[in-house]
Image: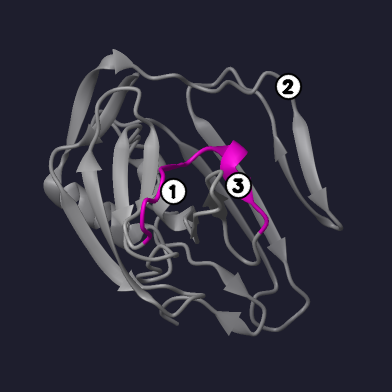
Amino acid sequence: MNNQITIKKKIEIEGLGLHSGVTTKLILYPAPVDTGIIFKRIDLKNSESIEANWKNIVPASLCTKISNKKGEFVSTIEHFMFALYSLEITNLIIEINGPEIPILDGSAKIFIEEINKFGLILQNKKRKNISIRKSFEICDGSKFIKYQPTNKKFLEIDYTINYNDQFIKKQKFFKKCKRELQGYLQLQNILPSRRFRKNICYGSC
């Protein structure tokens, strides 16, 4: 799909924050074209919008955190944002009554299932896409992620982890993600993926 997408109706999702331990509720609202993904902290007086934009990412430990100019923030957004990406949702307003997105089962799966219960709306304006024009790499010690341009009509993910222990060891994942007619990506094998840290498991283990 090349057009922008929003949800059909209001959706409420509630759960516990992984790092904060605070129960929070998300209320998702349909949004007009060119709105983007907008968070609003309704637990804060006179709060301002927090746009889900890479420019608004701020330093955080073991999560992705975004903030506005007032310093109001929302953290642990990564699984929720992946759910929106996999459904190709481009316009959404999210009210949240706390500092952190609920962890739910530790993956994007429940977010996607809840949104799919209510359905999506294809809007009448083209989306803006980002194109990778040249290869680049981000490194942290021996860890790295590399992006490469392609002429193929799908996303390829080639991921390897290698831990020196008896449980995780070396694992490799390769996936070609083609767009489906329903308007979202073939990412079913990735949706239940959970984050982990050595000696700690997040979500249901």
Q: Which mark is residue 57?
A: 3
Q: Amino acid at mark 2?
A: Lys
Question: Badge 2 is on which residue?
Answer: 134
Q: Badges 1 and 2: C-beta atoms under 8 Å apart?
A: no
Q: Could you tell me which quadrant the N terminus lies in? A: top left
- Relative vertical location of residue 91 with respect to residue 106 in this rendering, above or below: above
Q: Position of residue 3 (x, y in %)?
A: 30, 19
Which residue shows up at 31% across the image and 24% down it?
4
Dot placed on the residue nearer the N-terminal end, 1 or 3:
3
Mark 1–mark 3 Cα distance, whole angstroms, equals 15 Å
Picture quadrant of residue 101: bottom left
Describe the element under mark 2 as helix, strand or loop.
loop
Q: Is residue 50 magenta?
A: yes
Which residue shows up at 70% across the image and 73% down it?
169
Q: Position of residue 33 (x, y in %)?
A: 29, 23
Describe the element under mark 3 as helix, strand or loop.
strand
Q: Position of residue 48 (x, y in %)?
A: 41, 45
Dot placed on the residue nearer the N-terminal end, 1 or 2:
1
Question: Badge 1 is on which residue?
Answer: 82
Mark 3–mark 2 Cα distance, whole angstroms, equals 23 Å
| Scheme of image coloration | one colour
Q: Is residue 83 magenta?
A: no
Total number of numbered discs in the rendering: 3
Q: Position of residue 97 (x, y in %)?
A: 32, 63
Which residue shows up at 44% across the image and 76% down it?
203
The segment highlighted magenta reads 44-59
> In front of the other: label 3 or label 2?
3
Dot placed on the residue nearer the N-terminal end, 3 or 2:
3
